[in-house]
Amino acid sequence: MTSAASPTAEPFTTIVGLEVHVQLQTLTKLFCGCSTAFGSPPNTQVCPTCLGLPGSLPVMNRKAFELAVRAALALNCRIAPFTKWDRKNYFYPDLPKGYQISQFDLPFSSDGQLEVVDPKGAFAPRTVGIVRVHLEEDAGKSMHDEAAGTADTRIDLNRAGTPLCEIVTQPDLRSPQEARAWLNELKLLLVYLGVSDCNMQEGSLRVDANVNLHIPQPDGRIAKTPIVEIKNMNSFRSVERALTYEAARQWEEWQATKVEMGRMPKQTRGWDDPAGITRPQRQKEESSDYRYFPEPDLVPVTVDEPQLARIRAAMGAPPTELRRTLADRWKIPAYDADVLVNQGRELVAYFEAVATAVADGKLASNWMQQDVLRTLNERGGTIGEFPVRPEQVAEIIGRVQKGEFDTSRGREIFAEVLSSGRPVADVVAALGIAAVSDDELIALCRELIAANPKIVADVQGGKEQAAAGLIGQAKKKNPNANPGKVRQMCLELIRGM
Amino acid sequence: MSLSRQDVAKVGMLARLALSESDLDVMTTEMSKIVGFVSLLAEVDTASVEPLAHPLDSQNVFRDDLPQPSLTTSEALQSAPRHDGECFLVPAVLGESGAA
């Protein structure tokens, strides 16, 4: 496999489409009032409706429907004025009714798109078409004791009936890297808009990928390898790895067999993360095998413009818009805005608090990237839990602006405030940091010049960079000395000799 | 309209029914009759008929996103043929969930 920088070097194009399920951020399930909280003991969040007991009837959760519409609007989808639900029939122990309530021929939305732009230009901006977004219920959880082999399977139905949005893309992605980047953008969007927490560890976001290769032939025809659906990917990183592996596998298989799409049914393969390979899984049932029919227990839903306007108004700004406004408002580079926005809404608020207090967006952004984000990444956790608050960062920057100390001293203070949890003023006092007067500075520079005739000779000989040696010594003698000033003053003094 | 034995065997598999050879004989005959009877509907001209999404003339029935008490675990499990006090127990199902 070649690197992302030269995808054209491959003798094929990787074609990827994604199917993403996200759990909507509701308090209760799609059709009943049971809690959707994660991690409760098994079968404590179940009722006759989600257990599929006779005589129970589903009633649609309004919040779930509105969050689903919000997701579809954010993905630039067309919202259907009339939508209904259907039964998708299959038998599996974690599906207590024997069918899943889903949407078949009249999903509530279709024909959207979401663009992903790599700020470093690793790939060209890619607009990915959305085939449809629909609203359906989740199944329960089966727990197999694989080692025992013949042991019972245990079924927990807490998750059964949880609202899911299914998002199906066109096969518009052209590399594993693009797929991963696009998923990051999708997740960011859905988290920003409060649609889902997209927590993959808790199963709030699940991805299946369809992949095949387009291989140009000597006669100009494009040969297409059979489509493979990959399941069991538990992180965006595994999506990228699985697609990379699968593209290489299909390329080898193509060279050996020359089998093209349509000669065999769509294959399902599971990603084995520790082994780093995909393995064949059971053949998927055909769509007709699910014997879809309209759900008689739910009445259709209609959506009109005033309703859409209300949902739009409650949505808030999507990340793409926020990147633009942030770059404009604070005069920061697009790259900076991208990094900040990609960290989430809370971090953007933190940045804006700092930027407002110091009245300098670029300076605030530099501190965010070099100090706040770097230490936040090292420590882990969220910006909300970060011990140094925006007022404190602004105070440190403000003191640098006033010339009390230089940026590198400011960094030390930041680190000390972070580790000690003490106020900035206390840390400044404790570190013995005090502004160095110009008189003190001149005295210091004279002392250094007298003690370093070699450096002085070098500078006089035209090697100004030799002055760096003086700055290092100045720092040792007085840590509060501003290196820029020391350099400037020493050069002036030497020139005047 | 008639159904083949393979059609019936496939429907049986989808319904997770273990049909014996003699079951298949009986089912193939009887299901063909049922499908034949229903296919009478194909004679109706439906060109000008709107598809019916729901027999009731009602739309937009919602409830608020407010938690309601769930059953206790023992209530939830009480009708299960087998359970371990926490989970429903079913014969080992290996491989992927059929969820899509």
Image (cartoon, coloured by chain):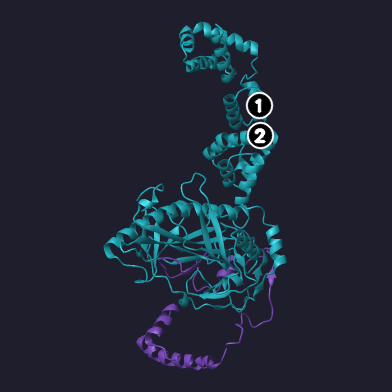
Picture residue at 61% right of the left edge, 86% below the top? B49
The Cα atoms of the two marked residues, 2 and 1, are separated by: 10 Å
In front of the other: A295 or A189: A189
Name the kind of residue labelled 2 in the image.
Answer: Asp
Q: Which residue is mark 2?
A: A360
Identify the hue of chain A. Answer: cyan
Name the kind of residue labelled 1 in the image.
Answer: Gln
Q: Position of residue A442 (x, y in %)?
A: 61, 10
Residue A447 versus residue A71 in the image, above or below:
above
Q: Are marks 2 and 1 in contact (CB under 8 Å)?
A: yes
Q: Which residue is mark 1?
A: A401
Per the rendering, the mark at residue A311 is: none
Q: Position of residue A486 (x, y in %)?
A: 57, 16
In front of the other: B32 or A171: A171
Residue A251 versus residue A122 in the image, above or below:
below
Task: Describe residue A305's horizontal placement relative to residue A256 as left or right.
Answer: right
> In this orientation, does residue A298 appear?
yes
Mark 2 burial class by Cα count in 10 Å: few <14, some 14-19, many 20+: some
Task: Describe residue A355's horizontal placement relative to residue A96 as left or right.
Answer: right
Picture residue at 46% right of the left edge, 58% below the top? A173
Labels 2 and 1: the sequence-earlier one: 2
In front of the other: A250 or A421: A250
Q: Which chain is purple?
A: B
The quarter holding residue A307 reads: bottom right
Quarter of the image with the C terminus of chain A is: top right
Task: Describe residue B14's horizontal placement relative to residue A9 as left or right.
Answer: right
The quarter holding residue A239 reads: bottom left
Residue A295 versus residue A417 in the image, above or below:
below
